[in-house]
Amino acid sequence: MTNPFSTENLLRRQAQLSDAMSAGGFDAMALNAGPSQVYMSGLHFHLMERPTVLLLAPGKSPVIVLPDFEKGKLSSLDFELRAVTYSENPAEWQAAFNQAAALIGPAKQIGVEGLRMRVMELRYLQAAFPGAEFPIAEHLIADMRKHKDAGEIAAMKKAVEIAEGGLEATLKKIKIGMSEKEIAGILVQELYALGSDPELPFAPIVAAAANSANPHSTVSDYRIKEGDLLLIDWGASYNGYLSDLTRTFAVGEISEEFKRIYEVVKLANQAGREAAAIGAPCAAVDEAARDAIDDNGYGQYFTHRTGHGLGMEGHEEPYMRGDNTLPLAEGMSFTVEPGIYLDGRGGVRIEDNVVMTADGPLTLSSFPRELRSVGK
């Protein structure tokens, strides 16, 4: 498997971002700890009370401000990354940012990620670059990250395989009377046993009965019983890349209406995946899935977009919603996850992970979509 964080890939990304900054009139970009910082450096840091900021400027070697005790992480790098470290004393932190600014040189337009840059880091940067503006510029990296290469896709495929194996092992252990929390706990153990990265994409959603009608339900002490729908939304992580899947199950025998909405959602899932085509707008995926549900009389119960981009984050570009005219292109990866939610009764969602190839959409996930009974 090609390493998504090889030196070659990292330098290519840095050069590509350098070109994008120059074209967009940016003198630099400041990245907080998070996926984009990893994407550009290969280094993993937690977003915590100590700042860790990566500064990239066109035509210059990157600079990183980080705690002194974290400097050992840089020893394995095969490219130049200038480090400015600081001690545990917060009174010294501004001096480190000032030193980093001197290494970068004059900068008046410094792009930041609006969803990641915190007030703390922004204040240090503002003091280090007097008079500079800090416009939101996450689109510069988002435009790069939404096109996955072979190594990234391979990592996502492995994350799907781990997730599917973990769920299959979990289903064999489910019994009527188990709580949502108990099922979620088993699933997490199975994901780790099969090799998921320690940091999962999100806490698994295990939602039964009326809870399954809440698309983002939180696991509870509810104990599953005969006739429930059981919705499980889960994922795994491999080498920093994620999977995000959903399957819905019958606990024993379920009502005829539950069976019907299951089949409608399955049809919508297939329609959405088949609508994905190179050059087609993202909206086409949403429209195809939504039409399948509308045509069967349940349109008012499909309450969210059909999907979202997937990669180093669970939600990233591109988004499968009805107003998104962005054309699908090779390397884009996203979810297709239509649902029907009957408030107070139960809900069904079927979610798959798709990547666009030169030959069209490739569904990375293969877990069966036929209605399956569990708990016996």
Image (tube, rainbow, N blue to C red):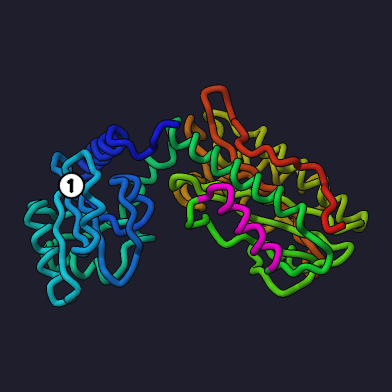
Query: In the drawing, does residue 320 fall left or right of residue 52?
Result: right
Query: In the drawing, does residue 337 fall left or right of residue 323?
Result: right
Query: In the drawing, does residue 294 fall left or right of residue 243?
Result: right
Q: Which residue is the site of mark 1? A: 81
Q: How many marks?
A: 1
> What percent of the width, then of the height, locates residue 374?
82, 54
Q: Is residue 194 magenta?
A: yes
The magenta segment is: 182-196
Q: Is residue 369 visible?
A: yes
Q: Pick the quarter of the image with the C terminus.
A: bottom right
Q: Kindly indicate the quadrant of the structure image that contains residue 71.
A: bottom left
Residue nearest the observer in this picture, 109 or 241: 241
> What percent of the width, then of the height, locates residue 361?
59, 30
Residue drawn at x 31%, y 62% is 117
Assign a secondary structure to mark 1.
loop
Q: Kindly indicate the quadrant of the structure image that contains residue 210.
A: bottom right
Amino acid tagged 1: Leu
Instruction: Characterize the magenta stretch by its predominant secondary structure.
Output: helix
> What percent of the width, then of the height, locates residue 119?
29, 70
